[in-house]
């Protein structure tokens, strides 16, 4: 039965997916439990939420008493959003990170070169997107930190090796491996309506090494043997083919808007460092990002942008548009 979840519930659910601390997770779960429509169709989900909350509370208590983090690696979110690279050994994950960012991860023709997940920043126009390079996933190996990182990512890039005859099989192995867990890949991000532990992360299929002999035939084979409904970006990380289209698509997938803040005394906004908000984000959310005092004391803002006349006064519920210039007033 469809649960008819409210907008507030879905927002909390999205924040839950992105939470980077146990406290944040707990706060989101509380909102979800409060917001969930209370009827028969959601009994199961309500019970799930309650058991998650009690588990988290125990975990938090354990952290406090031991002074140690119980969860593994958490990479702090930076930039407009996070894309995690996934793939079998040698698919070119590190090569792609090296191409799209200034990072210099080790790239080598043998498997298991990368041993720990590592973040790097990918520039796009005037913003940055965090990319996470990862150790490979095989039929019998998956780094235990990856579940949390995949779940918290806005996007996964699933790389496939078009140079190797095993590329398609290895891709299938990876998907099978994830299918045994509660961290899965999908065309769109969501949490399962029945089981809040089960999360789906929006994924692009990224067949790599299209420059290699026989790559086009292997790509066809991939489509035949492993049909996926993910958007596809065929690339050569080494030669640079398709990388700018991929870079742009990664940014677009985040569905954020850029907003430039301006001091009332200044003629021009700070163009160097836009704030990024999820599309649909309001002035009040921006105010909270700029400073918590603005969140409390915001009277109005003046906006220069595509949706309003220059300098229009708006209130906290104004929905920000890409490239708006905003002058906050307390
Ligand atoms: N021909 C070709 N080779 C590539 C391409 N991208 C990467 N390679 C080569 O593939 C090999 C593996 O690249 P890596 O970037 O180390 O692969 P990885 O997925 O990070 O590997 P692990 O860290 O072991 O999981 C290296 O020898 C790269 O030079 C490409 O577009 N074309
Ligand atoms: Mg690597």
Image (cartoon, helix red, strand yellow):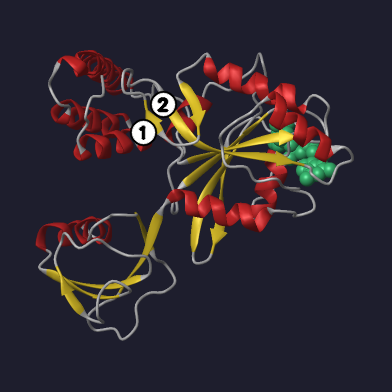
Q: Nearer the viewer, mark 1 or mark 2?
A: 2
Which residue occupies the extreme bottom position in the image? 267
**Which label number is shown at residue 17?**
1
**135 w.r.t. 105: above or below:** above
**Which image quarter holds the C terminus?**
bottom left
Q: Is residue 44 left or right of residue 182?
A: left
Tally of numbered tags: 2
Q: Are marks 1 and 2 in contact (CB under 8 Å)?
A: yes
Q: Secondary structure at mark 2?
A: strand
Placement of 5 over or under 309, stated as above or below: above
Asked whether 1 or 320 is in front, the reply is 1
* x, y percent for residue 165: 83, 26
Residue 149, can we see it?
A: no
Residue 6 % position (x, y) = 19, 35
Residue drawn at x 70%, y 39% is 207
Spot occupied by residue 76 in the image (x, y as percentages of width and height): 43, 42
Label placed on residue 199: 2
């Amino acid at each position: 039965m469809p649960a008819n979840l409210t907008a507030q519930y879905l927002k909390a659910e999205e924040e839950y997916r992105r939470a980077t601390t146990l406290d944040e997770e707990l706060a989101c779960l509380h909102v979800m439990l409060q917001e969930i429509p209370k009827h028969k169709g959601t009994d199961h989900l309500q019970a799930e939420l309650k058991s998650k909350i009690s588990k988290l509370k125990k975990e938090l208590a354990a952290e406090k008493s031991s002074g140690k983090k119980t969860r593994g690696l958490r990479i702090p979110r930076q930039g407009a959003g996070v894309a995690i690279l996934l793939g079998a050994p040698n698919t070119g994950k590190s090569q792609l990170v090296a191409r799209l960012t200034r990072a210099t991860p080790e790239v080598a023709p043998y498997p298991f070169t990368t041993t720990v997940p590592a973040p790097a920043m990918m520039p796009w126009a005037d913003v940055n997107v965090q990319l996470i390079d990862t150790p490979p996933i095989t039929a019998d190996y998956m780094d235990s930190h990856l579940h949390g990182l995949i779940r918290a990512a806005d996007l996964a890039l699933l790389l496939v090796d078009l140079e190797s005859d095993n590329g398609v099989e290895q891709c299938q192995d990876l998907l099978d491996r994830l299918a045994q867990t509660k961290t899965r890949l999908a065309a769109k991000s969501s949490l399962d309506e029945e089981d809040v532990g089960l999360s789906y992360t929006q994924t692009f299929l990224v067949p790599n090494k299209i420059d290699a002999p026989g790559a086009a035939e292997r790509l066809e084979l991939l489509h035949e043997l492993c049909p996926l409904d993910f958007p596809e970006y065929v690339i050569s990380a080494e030669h640079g083919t398709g990388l700018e289209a991929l870079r742009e698509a990664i940014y677009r997938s985040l569905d954020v808007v850029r907003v430039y803040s301006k001091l009332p005394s200044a003629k021009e906004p700070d163009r160097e460092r836009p704030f990024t908000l999820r599309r649909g984000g309001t002035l009040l959310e921006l105010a909270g990002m700029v400073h918590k005092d603005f969140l409390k004391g915001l009277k109005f803002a003046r906006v220069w942008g595509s949706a309003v006349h220059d300098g229009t006064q708006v209130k906290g519920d104004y929905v920000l548009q890409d490239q708006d210039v905003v002058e906050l007033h307390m």
